[in-house]
Image (cartoon, rainbow, N blue to C red):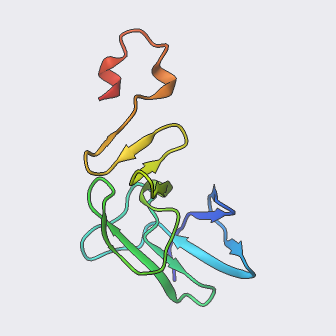
């Protein structure tokens, strides 16, 4: 399969490369075209094995809700972040994003000390 891809190695996001786990290699393709949507935020769309066989496929609604997915699970989804099963939100290292609202559920933590910041949190 041709195209660029984002790869995670032991749950760490890498640029080009291969994810190796259990003596198998998996390739994440973030720019794979779909009939309905095209990922432009670095969201994994397809995972292939060493032979190029598609073993996982995912499509998203506009703000990251699952549109269609194959049965094989994948930790990294919308914008490459991990979906927290307990909350149903995406954890982005410092705060959560809710796909139902298309918004962050907490304010940006780095902006807490910036005066007049309320317009930046919407």
Question: Which residue lies most toward the top here?
Answer: 115
Question: Which residue lies most toward the front here?
Answer: 86
Residue 99 locus on image (x, y percent): 31, 51
Q: Residue at x 40, y 32 (%)?
A: 106
- Answer left or right for 23 relative to 92: right
Residue 70 locus on image (x, y percent): 40, 80
Tell me which corner region of the image, top left, top right, bottom left or bottom right, holds residue 18.
bottom right
- Residue closer to the observer: 31 or 66: 66
Q: Residue at x 40, y 28 (%)?
A: 107
Vertical relation: 99 (above or below) 27: above
- Answer left or right for 35 relative to 33: left
Q: Residue at x 28, y 67 (%)?
A: 37
Q: Quadrant of the C terminus?
A: top left
Vertical relation: 93 (above or below) 28: above
Q: Residue at x 68, y 64 (%)?
A: 9
- Residue closer to the observer: 15 or 13: 13
């Amino acid at each position: 399969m041709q195209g660029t891809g984002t790869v995670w190695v032991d749950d760490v996001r890498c640029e080009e490369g291969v994810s190796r786990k259990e003596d198998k290699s998996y390739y994440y393709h973030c720019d794979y075209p779909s009939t309905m949507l095209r990922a432009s935020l670095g969201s994994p769309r397809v995972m292939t094995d060493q032979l190029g066989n598609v073993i996982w496929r995912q499509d998203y609604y506009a703000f990251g809700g699952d549109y269609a997915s194959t049965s094989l699970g994948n930790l990294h989804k919308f914008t490459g972040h991990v979906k927290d099963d307990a909350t149903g939100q995406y954890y982005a290292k410092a705060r959560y994003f809710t796909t139902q609202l298309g918004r962050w559920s907490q304010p940006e933590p780095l902006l807490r000390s910036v005066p007049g910041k309320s317009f930046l949190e919407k």
